[in-house]
Amino acid sequence: MMSKTHIAVGVASALAIAQTGSAESCVAAMIGGSIGGIIADCDITPSRAHKDALIGRIVVIAVSVVSLAIDYWYGAGVCDYLVGSLGVWLIVGIVLFAALTFVGGHTDHRSFTHSLVGMAAFCGSFYLICEPLLPYFVIGYASHLVLDITNKQGIQLFWPFKANASLGLCRAKGFANTVVLVLGIAVAALLLAYRLAPLFGVSIGVF
Ligand SMILES: [Zn+2]
């Protein structure tokens, strides 16, 4: 799947487990789900041939910045947590996360970063950076691996073993990608509206 699809599905998955009526939870889901949904593809170097990788990075930065701005403006709590947790472990987490991204960028596409080992390493470093966002990051990351397993190219889920995990259902680009992208955006928008509705005094008695 393409970057925007991974981000949309990552955010939708994270919003599915977010708390209803909690702005903090929704902001955390937007940031954690979008970063978790795309970070595995740090093994693609943005270039002319891989414009999609660049678009993905821009989208995820935009989503995170806008979400943090909303959080800061409404005092939802994520910014306060980051400021309050400034310290050695936060720095260790950022350095570890950056190192893993660097290492991932020098490995084969769909190998280390698309494995359970890679996922555990990224989640561990993310835990040190911002613990409240971890569940959303984990589900976003998991959604990326699940989507890529449906791809004909598959992924090395059990890296360092080379065995390829693939359901062989679709290709990264094409009709299936468009359908999943549209569904991901629609589900994310509906879930966001549903989760935030109580804050505006609106009651939606669907679930
Ligand atoms: Zn991928």
Image: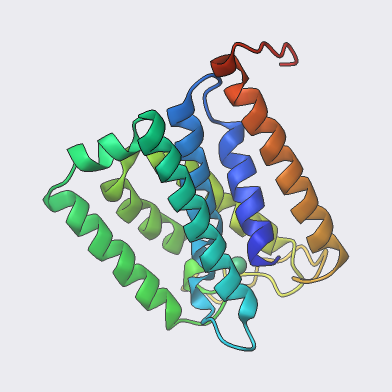
Seen in the picture, residue 2 relative to 105 is either above or below; the reply is above
Residue 163 percent coordinates (x, y): 60, 73
Residue 116 percent coordinates (x, y): 48, 59
Q: Which coloring applies here?
A: rainbow
| On-image quarter of the N terminus | bottom right
Seen in the picture, residue 186 relative to 106 is either above or below; the reply is above
Residue depicted at x 54% and y 17%: 199
Residue 61 percent coordinates (x, y): 47, 59
Residue placed most toward the observer, 99 or 24? 24
Residue 188 figure quarter: top right
Residue depicted at x 59% and y 45%: 11
Residue extending furthest toward the right: 175
Asked if residue 131 lies left or right of residue 69, the reply is left
Residue extending furthest toward the bottom: 48
Seen in the picture, residue 16 relative to 165 is either above or below; the reply is above
Q: Is residue 158 visible?
A: no
Q: Is residue 126 visible?
A: yes
Q: Quadrant of ligand 1?
A: bottom right
